[in-house]
Amino acid sequence: MDQDFLASFFAVPPVLLGRKLKPFCCGHAVILASLESPFIVSGKVTPEELIVAVWVCSQTFEEGRDKILNGGDVLRVECEKWGGEIGGFDFSKAVVDFERYLTDYTKAPERWKTKASKEARAPWPLVVATTIMHEFPVSESDAWNMPLPKALWYFAACAEAFYGDESLVSQRDRERAKRARTAREGAKNVG
């Protein structure tokens, strides 16, 4: 069975700055983008930005969204209060740990790139969440809070099973590509 697929279902979110993070999901991506988090839209990461990102990812989508809908004041006050309680921490290590969390949770199934490949026009979290809601009997909340690797694999499986998408790279494809690379490198070394 595909090792990337298996890893996506068994990722365990870390504890960061004393908070247990939730699995990164489409909802977290939307909230962090709406806050223009440098972890999503790029930019300089500050301790304050890290605290907000960790706080957002330790909440469900609805908890974070509701605090933003209240004018953002609830979010700002909670983050400032919690940030003050943290005390000193190794900022560089915490940034690396948070970025590793994002990397682990945003790894999409590998796909072949073709001339026919198109990017979605709608924001990607919306495309993934609505596809999950359309194809599976899950609630809106479940779709927005579903661990992103799981949602991305469901999305890819739907594209293949129901819409004829043949771009998903299988474990067998990766093994064949590795053997071909090894053979090419061996041929270079001989000649």
Image (cartoon, helix red, strand yellow):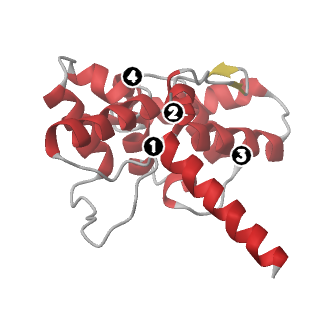
Question: Which residue in the structure is indicated by mark 3?
Answer: 47
User: Mark 4 or mark 3: which comes first in sequence?
Assistant: 3
Answer with the quarter of the image where residue 146 lies: top left
Question: Which residue in the structure is indicated by mark 2?
Answer: 2
Of the 4 image quadrants, the one containing the C terminus is bottom right
Question: Which residue in the structure is indicated by mark 1?
Answer: 170
Give the foreground label among 3 and 2: 2
Three-letter code, disc 1: Ser
Q: Residues within 10 Å of mark 3 (few under 14, many from 20)?
A: some
How far is mark 2 from mark 1, CA to CA? Answer: 7 Å
Give the foreground label among 1 and 3: 1
Q: Residues within 10 Å of mark 4 (few under 14, many from 20)?
A: few
- Tag 4–tag 3 contact (CB < 8 Å): no
Three-letter code, disc 3: Pro
Question: Which residue in the structure is indicated by mark 4?
Answer: 63
Q: Is residue 34 above or below residue 15?
A: below
> Residue at 29% of width from left, 73% of height from top?
115
> Residue at 61% of width from left, 24% of height from top?
13
Three-letter code, disc 4: Glu
For the residue pair 102 and 8, the one nearer the viewer reads as 8
Relative to 132, is 54 on the left or the right?
right
